[in-house]
Amino acid sequence: MHDNILVVYFSAGGNTARAAREIAGAVEGHIREIVPAMPYSAADLDWTDRTSRTSREMNDASCRPQTASEIDISSYDTIFLGFPIWWYTEPRIIDTFLEEQDFSGKIVIPFATSGGSGISGAENRMIKICPDAKWQKGAIVNTGAAAWAKRAIK
């Protein structure tokens, strides 16, 4: 186990959790889940409903859903940060996590799962939210997460 690598993820439907487990295994890192204080229901996740919780959150760039998980990143040098792509970017709970932590000088490697959107919109937003991190290029890892992660840390 690499004591300086952490894989942190938020997963709504299980796809990102699967990718995170693959990445953690491939890089022999620790793994932690970002858990929302108020879990998302199926109705909350209905992106076709303009009044659903996720639609409201994603339409408000200042929204910061509370987390129930306490994650300490202080002892890690490299952090893989995973999430599903929502509305072409990261879910707002990721923004909460970024603002709750001190990423100064840490290598952050984003990864995401997506039904068709890329990760660049999320990368651009996260760099603005957390400019003190050493951001590396991320990837969509619907498949091949382990192989990508091994290449990402070399």
Image (cartoon, rainbow, N blue to C red):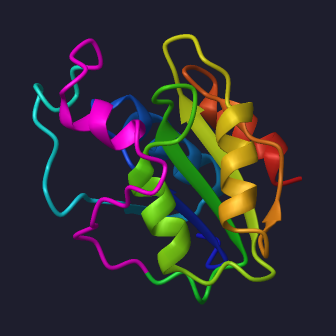
> Residue 142 or 97: which is nearer the viewer?
97
Q: Position of residue 66 (x, y in %)?
A: 27, 66
Q: Position of residue 20 (x, y in %)?
A: 48, 45
Whether residue 75 is visible: yes
Magenta part mainly helix, strand or loop? loop
**Residue that extends furthest to the bottom in the rendered view of this protein:** 74
Whether residue 9 is visible: no
Q: Position of residue 74 (x, y in %)?
A: 59, 88
Q: Is residue 103 magenta?
A: no
> Residue 1 or 80: which is nearer the viewer?
80
Q: Is residue 143 above or below residue 15?
A: above
Write the residue at 79% across / 76% down. Answer: 132
Write the residue at 43% across / 36% down. Answer: 16
**Residue that extends furthest to the right in the rendered view of this protein:** 154
Q: Position of residue 144 (x, y in %)?
A: 63, 24
> Residue 129 or 25: which is nearer the viewer?
129
**In the displayed structure image, the side of residue 86 where residue 133 appears, left or right:** right
Figure disc tally: 0
Write the residue at 25% across / 20% down. Answer: 50
Q: Is residue 105 above or below residue 86?
A: below
- Over which residues does the magenta segment extend? 47-71
> Residue 63 or 34: which is nearer the viewer?
63
Q: Is residue 60 magenta?
A: yes
- Which quadrant, please, contains the N terminus? bottom right
**In the displayed structure image, the side of residue 30 where residue 18 appears, left or right:** left
